[in-house]
Image (tube, helix red, strand yellow):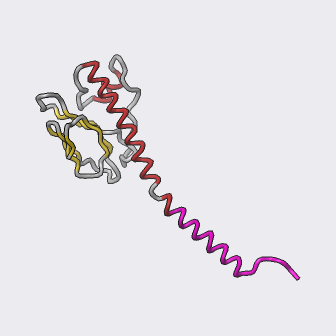
Amino acid sequence: MKRGFTLLELMVVIAVVAILAALLVINLQGISADAKNSVAKSDLRNIKTALIMYEAHFNLLPPQEDWEECLQNDDPRIIDRIPPDPWSPSGDKYRYKLNSDSPAGKTYVVLSVGANGVEEVKVYYDRVTDKGDDIIVTNARSLE
């Protein structure tokens, strides 16, 4: 008499393994998006801190055109590098928008384009509007 598994036993084991694999794939699908969101939020908090330090030292915000060079190359150096936006389809860095028309100071926003890869932020005097899924940090009084 030979001992071994029957065909039915093998099919049950394969079915159980397939169900477990399917559940694992379903649970892991959102992890990549969550990781990108966490990285973007952490990077943006660091950049906002660098902007606060820059403004405290120079009594103004860096200009929109060369904000990265101002934070990285001015003396004293505020930040070592501006990291790339994890949501940018082309690997671009985070975006910085400045409303220099505000009379009582300047309103800025630093943003990640979010999952849809499109920037949908507008900066006004003391307010910022975002109609998309962008991840932002700002010094605006209101966010709409």
Counting the numbered discs, the total is 0
Which residues lie in the magenta part?
1-25
Predominant secondary structure, magenta span: helix
Residue nearer the viewer, 141 or 115: 141
Residue 8 location in percent, x, y? Answer: 70, 81
For this orientation, the residue located farthest to the front is: 141
Q: Is residue 128 left or right of residue 90?
A: left
Seen in the picture, residue 131 relative to 22 is either above or below; the reply is above
Q: Is residue 67 left or right of residue 99?
A: right
Residue 112 location in percent, x, y? Answer: 33, 43
Occupied quadrant, residue 101: top left
Q: Quadrant of the N terminus?
A: bottom right
Occupied quadrant, residue 61: top left
Seen in the picture, residue 74 relative to 132 is either above or below; the reply is above
Residue nearer the viewer, 32 or 87: 32
Residue in view at x 30 percent, y 28 percent: 51
Residue 19 location in percent, x, y? Answer: 57, 70
For this orientation, the residue located farthest to the top is: 75
Question: Is residue 45 on the magenta stretch?
Answer: no
Seen in the picture, residue 125 relative to 20 is either above or below; the reply is above
Seen in the picture, residue 101 relative to 60 is either above or below; the reply is below
Residue nearer the viewer, 80 or 34: 34
Residue in view at x 32 percent, y 26 percent: 69
Question: Is residue 20 on the magenta stretch?
Answer: yes
Occupied quadrant, residue 91: top left
Residue 106 location in percent, x, y? Answer: 18, 30
Residue in view at x 62 percent, y 69 percent: 17
